[in-house]
């Protein structure tokens, strides 16, 4: 057999095997449809739709005090509630939130309205620690520090896992 044919058949076989493995993985690990939010007034985590744009209505009243929460655990078991830690919370600017929600509803932007593009979206996303009072744009040095500071090993040399509801 020609060596080119062997190489091509080998590549096709590897590609097919990869597709089968990917399909199996996706079937065993479906994407999460919910994520954690933190109600500031109640000081409590709750599950909300992954597609929700924070701030959203919290759990106790009509106030929009529910913020997306990055929840982690060093125990290695994301279902272990006692080991969960909120690394930071996240929200979007009112202007960006309105734009995204309008786009999802299929509305056409009003002429003259300034559209926030993908490049500028990060500057309209804000993060903070639960212990902080100030929100920081995701592009700021302080936000970059907040977002990355949880990605360290614990005293046992283990990295935390991200928890989903």
Image (spheres, rainbow, N blue to C red):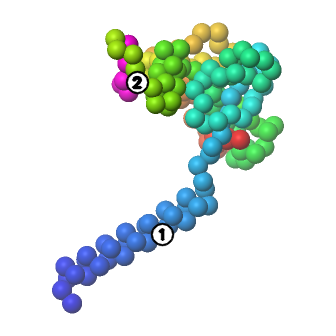
The image shows residue 99 at horizontal and vertical percentages of 47, 21
Tag nearer the camera, 2 or 1: 2
How many residues crowd mark 2 within 10 Å: few (<14), some (14–19), many (20+)? few
**Numbered tag placed on residue 95 in the rendering:** none
Q: Is residue 164 above or below residue 100?
A: below
Residue 141 located within the stretch drawn in magenta: no
Q: Residue at x 29, y 79 (%)?
A: 9
Please name whichever residue, 28 or 159, is drawn nearer the observer in this view of the structure. 28
Type of secondary structure dominating the magenta stretch = loop
The answer to whether 17 appears left or right of 97 in the picture is: left
**Residue drawn at x 38%, y 27% as measured from the top left:** 118
Q: Is residue 141 left or right of residue 132?
A: left
Measured from the top left, where is residue 41 in percent x and y? Answer: 77, 15
**Could you tell me how far apart the alpha carbons at marks 2 and 1 are, in whole angstroms?**
41 Å
Which residue is the site of mark 1? 20
Along the horizontal axis of the image, is 61 left or right of 3? right
Q: Is residue 139 visible?
A: no
């Amino acid at each position: 057999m020609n060596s080119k044919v062997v190489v091509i058949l080998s590549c096709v076989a590897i590609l097919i095997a990869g597709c089968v493995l990917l399909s199996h993985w996706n079937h065993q690990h479906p994407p999460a449809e919910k994520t954690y939010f933190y109600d500031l007034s109640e000081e409590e985590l709750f599950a909300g739709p992954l597609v929700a744009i924070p701030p959203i209505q919290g759990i106790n009243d009509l106030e929009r005090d529910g913020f997306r929460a990055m929840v982690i655990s060093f125990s290695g078991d994301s279902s272990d509630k006692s080991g969960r830690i909120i690394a930071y919370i996240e929200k979007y600017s009112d202007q960006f939130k309105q734009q995204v929600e309008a786009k999802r509803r299929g509305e056409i932007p009003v002429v003259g309205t300034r559209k926030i593009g993908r490049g500028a979206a990060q500057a309209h996303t804000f993060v903070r620690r639960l212990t902080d009072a100030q929100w920081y744009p995701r592009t700021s040095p302080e936000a970059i520090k907040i977002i990355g500071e949880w990605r360290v090993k614990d005293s046992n040399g283990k990295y935390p896992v991200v928890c989903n509801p």
